[in-house]
Amino acid sequence: MFLEMQTMDIKDNTILRQFETHHQEALYAIEYAIQERKIFLTKFITPENPDEEFSQEFLKEVLEIARERKLKVVPTASKIASFFRKNPSYKEMLPVGIVI
């Protein structure tokens, strides 16, 4: 299933349980697990020298997908938790009791 957000094509690979996109011929992916209306973002896969701006945009698009699906987000990957710390506007997506 392809989800087109602005100019970014994001594939929800349900078999591998990850959101995927390509940028400059490199794979960017965010692994997830879904439990009880929560999505656990467990791993952020980027190439060796990632485009940080693209990485941030990709993460924002994945969070929008979670918002559309009415899922609370549990960031277990350190890079994703760091994003939540730097962007307090996304903290309402965290489940009750989760403080980052």
Image (spheres, helix red, strand yellow):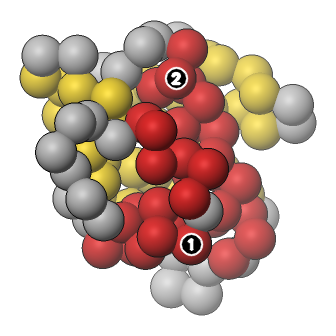
Q: Residue at x 47, y 61 (%)?
A: 84
User: Residue 19: x and y, percent?
Assistant: 45, 37
Q: Amino acid at mark 1?
A: Lys
In the displayed structure, would residue 20 be above or below residue 71?
below
User: Residue 80: x and y, percent?
Assistant: 41, 63
The residue sitting at the left extreme is: 35
Left/right placement of residue 63 relative to residue 19 reads: right
In the displayed structure, would residue 14 be above or below residue 60?
above
Q: Which mark is residue 67?
A: 2
Work out whether residue 88 or residue 54 is closer to the camera in this orientation and state it: 88
Write down the residue under mark 1.
Answer: 86
Work out whether residue 95 or residue 19 is closer to the camera in this orientation and state it: 95
User: Residue 65: x and y, percent?
Assistant: 55, 24
Residue 9 sits in which quadrant?
A: top right
Q: Amino acid at mark 2?
A: Arg
Q: Which mark is residue 45?
A: none
